[in-house]
Image (spheres, helix red, strand yellow):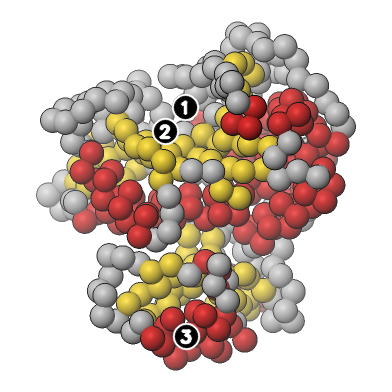
Amino acid sequence: MYTEREVLDYVAEEDVKFIRLAFFDLKGVQKNISIMAGQLEGAFRRGVGFDASAVCGFESAEKSDLFLFPDPATLSVLPWRPSSGKVVRMFCTIKYPDGRVYEKDFRSRLKDTVRSVREECGVEFRIGTEVEFYLFKLDESGRPTKIPFDGAGYMDIAPDDKGENIRREICFTLEQMGIMPESSHHEEGPGQNEIDFHYADAVSAADNAATFKWIVRTRAASAGLYADFSPKPLEGMAGSGLHINMSCSDPDKNSHALAGVLKHAREITYFLNSREDSYRRLGENKAPKAICWGHGNRLALVRVPDVTDMDAARLEVRSADCECNVYIALCLLLRAAADGIKGCLEPPPPGHTGEGDCGFLPASLAEARDVAKDSPFIKSVLGDAIRF
């Protein structure tokens, strides 16, 4: 957790030449601008301007000036760049020219959400993510194919599992950047992999998930492969999900939080599953469709693992995929959980996927958009930042 002064001293003392200022568009795609080391102090004070009209979901050309202010606490060295003339990265707060935080800066919105949930409910949530992705071969021109890197299956080992060396390099790189992966393995689909993370506060968990996608793509490209995070890259094979584990600081409120997530599941699906092919994944190969929960049930929307230590109790939301904006997704999940806690809601009994105790998830992107558009809950959380 560096301060501005510490970052400036580090840059001067450690031969840092370039600083990448990173932010996210409305779809959760990472963007960045690079500045020279000598411009960093001015960036802290005045920000770095950019054309918001060129960023997906942001502003029109008539109202296009926004500014990036680096967050010194997020300083991270890019270990694959030269050690002489280092390159570092910081995430940024997006502001208007008058200094107001931009309402579509959902990283800042997530910080506000964490604060409000703590104040309203007296709890904090720790978040852990499980991220799935495919590795595909490139053709002779370097373009991605749909040919999997290997034909291995769930938790297979080498030589069938050809992805273990890349996963190891990914984990090493993450550690060098201060991000702690917990485990990695081959998943069910051919060429499909998963890496899981230790729990962190919500903002750090979102930052880690976003950084992870960048690292995976970078390491895959260096190995002559393509990393695919789409929810259903191969028909008939397992889709790729982003499982979000939520651990409440007060285990006695877990059931209320669960009830809140189930209550608002249909409304938030548009933001957890943001592509047409997201809905080809849901309902197949253990991806949920019915809005229900269960102990240890990997077919349920929310899995509550059986544990002997209540401090380890968690809710595993299994519907999201990696094409979502993880900052928006966590804003909505935390507010849904808080709604359940404040209302002392109780979940239905553990259910079965064919019952849909609280209904079913939307069957298409269009249906999900209509549900979200008509939702007072979505309006209360996101305000006017989202235009349907």
Q: How many marks?
A: 3
Mark 1 or mark 3, which is nearer the start of the sequence? Answer: 3
Tag 3: residue type? Asp
Residue at horizontal 61 percent and vertical 49 percent from the top: 202
Residue situated in front as seen by the camera: 349 or 301: 349
Query: What is the spatial separation of the Cα atoms under label 1 and label 2, in whole angstroms?
Result: 8 Å
Q: Is residue 306 above or below residue 115?
A: above
Tag 1: residue type? Arg
Within 10 Å of disc 3 (Cα), the crowding (few <14, some 14-19, many 20+) is few
Residue pointed to by mark 2: 240
At mark 1, the secondary structure is helix
Tag 2: residue type? Ser
Residue at horizontal 54 percent and vertical 61 percent from the top: 24
What label does residue 281 carry, if any?
1
Query: What is the spatial separation of the Cα atoms under label 2 and label 3, in whole angstroms?
Result: 42 Å
Q: Is residue 248 above or below residue 20?
A: above
Residue pointed to by mark 3: 9
Residue 30 as seen in the image, left or right of residue 358: left
